[in-house]
Amino acid sequence: LCDRHPGFASAASSIARLANRLRARIRILALEGQGKNLARAFSAASGDSAPAFAEIPAWKNLLESSRSLQVPARFFVVFSARPQEASWHPALERIPHRLGEEYPDANILLVYLAREHSSSDQEAEIKASVDLLETAMAKGTVRVAMEQAAIADGIFELVASAFPFDRKTVTKTAARLTEIVQRQPLEIEPGVVLIHDRMPGISSPILCLGSRKQGFRLSLLERSVQVLVIILVPETQGAEDHLAFLSETARLFKEKNLARRMVEAKRPDDLGETG
């Protein structure tokens, strides 16, 4: 979905100009179902004809797919969201390294897409983020000053706040989320870890927030996790809506200094009083 990012057009235009100067042909590698839209968006941004594209089932198949290109790859350009943006993922960090190992003689350019928002857009986004917090507080899915020391227990407590009368669902969901965070934690800012997953049987996204001043230990992170953010979205929700919900949640922490407020709060109502 990088073609939906506000910085995509300017980045695509710059790469197209560079390719023209080098007399190089552009090939797009994208995840399944996204190649056609990316090629069309690239064409619209650059004013050139749509480049050829290939689709891959997952980024782990990147090297295999790159070898199948009709021409030798001389220059790789990786479009990426910025670290701590909702659409960024730790796996993105490995792509340039894998390309460098496979193609030691190729140039590699990593482009972090620029954020371009008008003041009215920013005001609307901030309001949407604040509404998320108010909704979570009203539903009782916000916990502060948590007593659980183990991150697995903290996750269980937060999931239980969303499904208080369904222990089977809580146990299964908490186990899956714990596995996700232990395997590949997504830190949206220091001390704040986001865990998100699709879930059957729900009709709208669920946001759970929890904090523990002493922190939860996680072996893959140097700093303890003081704030846990859990997002569950309907299994049928489109990728664009999923990404929008993640972005609104991440913005809530950035714009409202929510992490510090959660760590210092003694009860959930304190968050509303200092908003």
Image: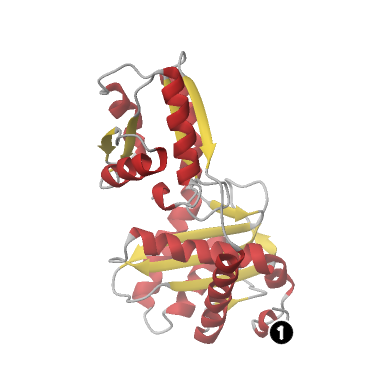
Q: Residue at x 39, y 70 (%)?
A: 171
Looking at the image, residue 145 sits to the left or right of residue 80; the answer is: right
Pick the front one: 210 or 219:
210
Question: Circle 1: is it few (<14), some (14-19), or many (20+) Cα within 10 Å?
Answer: few
Residue 124 in the image, given as x and y percentages of width and height: 55, 72
User: On screen, 234 above or below 59?
Assistant: below
> Helix, strand or loop at disc 1?
helix
Picture layout, residue 252 above or below residue 104 = below
**Direction top: furthest residue:** 105
Residue in view at x 66 percent, y 57 percent: 191
Q: Is residue 165 visible?
A: yes
| Residue 149 appears in the rendering | no
Q: Nearer the viewer, residue 248 or 186?
A: 248
Residue 30: quadrant of the picture: top left
**How many tags in the picture?**
1
- Measured from the top left, where is residue 46 in percent x and y? 40, 38
Instruction: Give 12 or 156, whichever is nearer the viewer.
Output: 12
User: Is 46 drawn above or below residue 203 in the view shown?
Assistant: above
Q: Which residue is mark 1?
A: 273
Residue 3 placement, left or right of 120: left
Residue at 37%, 75% in the rendered image: 204
User: Residue 157 location, x and y as percent?
Assistant: 52, 73
Identify the colour scheme used: secondary structure
Residue 175 to residue 101: above or below: below
Residue type pointed to by label 1? Glu
User: x%, y% of residue 151?
Assistant: 56, 61
